[in-house]
Image (cartoon, rainbow, N blue to C red):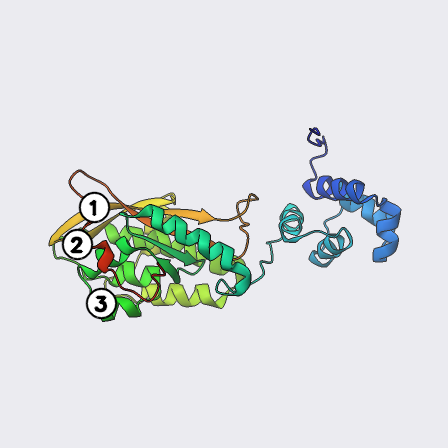
Amino acid sequence: MERAVTSTNNCAFGNLTRFWRNLRGITQEELALSLGFSTRHISFVETGKSQPSEELVDAFATKLKLGERDRCYLRLSAGYLSKGQEVDFHSPTYKWLRNAMLLSLQAMDPHPSALMDRYGNLLMVNRSWVIFHQDVLPKNTLGKVRNHYELLFTRPRSSHTSTQWQNTLAMILMSIQQEALLTNDPVYYAMVRDLTNLPNAPQDWQKAASDQEPMTSYRVELEYKGRVRSYYSVNLMVGALGPASFTSAPQLSINTLYPAGENEGFDTENLAQAVHPLLFF
């Protein structure tokens, strides 16, 4: 087994560039000549004496024949966000992934679970998810729901529900807002607008969220079987090994509800009766 390559140089971009140059058998002089730069400039970039432009980083990645994962590492090392490629989850290419997600959702029963994309759009659900939400929503209404956040925060609420959901909404809004500012993605901006326009959405959500640290799970209070119950809403990311801001496309997550207390279990008797457009098994 080969030993990991280490470096005492604090320039992450330079470390990665040298690693890939050595792997591809390309010298600084050859890289400089092929890209139309001086060897001195390439040397300065590798040692951190000069900041590479975004165009130069991408040129390096192309010349060094980096795939999406490794191009992402290189861009992040130079201070630039990755450029994820949009893919169609429903295309024939991703049949294997759909099958894998089906097995995952089936394994989650009897806990309500849903597969969603980076925007919270629902892609698949399991039987428990259908039965759980049909407890308070008519079949036709639930069948038209296409977004996880839309469902979570527009689901009918009992007068006995606490205001905890407002803190949860504030945290989610803060996460989406920062994604919008980082990526300038209009979809994220639209999500912030729509969620802040929800009835009773907290007006001071920025302040409320800034005082809390985000987590992959949070408590939610939802009515089920005529009683307000507390659940853990847990998100599991579906992606490749890599830096925190990179997941292999399509960027997916599975959201699952778990009982937060005793005697808060889910209905297992009526699972076979579940019917929904996003239920594929």
Tell me the residue that label 2 is attached to.
223
Q: Residue at x 34, y 50 (%)?
A: 106
Measured from the top left, where is residue 258 in percent x and y? 27, 44
Measured from the top left, where is residue 164 in percent x and y? 23, 49
The answer to whether residue 202 of the structure is visible from this angle is no
How much space separates mark 3 and mark 2, taking CA atoms?
17 Å
Q: Which residue is drawn at 75% across and 57% down?
A: 59
Q: Label 1 amino acid?
A: Ser
Q: Which of 208 and 110 is in front in this view?
A: 110
Question: Which mark, by number, is residue 204?
Answer: none
Q: Nearer the viewer, mark 3 or mark 1?
A: 3
Q: Label 3 amino acid?
A: Lys
Tell me the residue that label 1 is attached to.
230
Tell me the residue that label 3 is attached to.
139
Q: Which residue is drawn at 26% across and 53% down?
A: 128
Q: Which residue is drawn at 26% across and 59% down?
A: 130
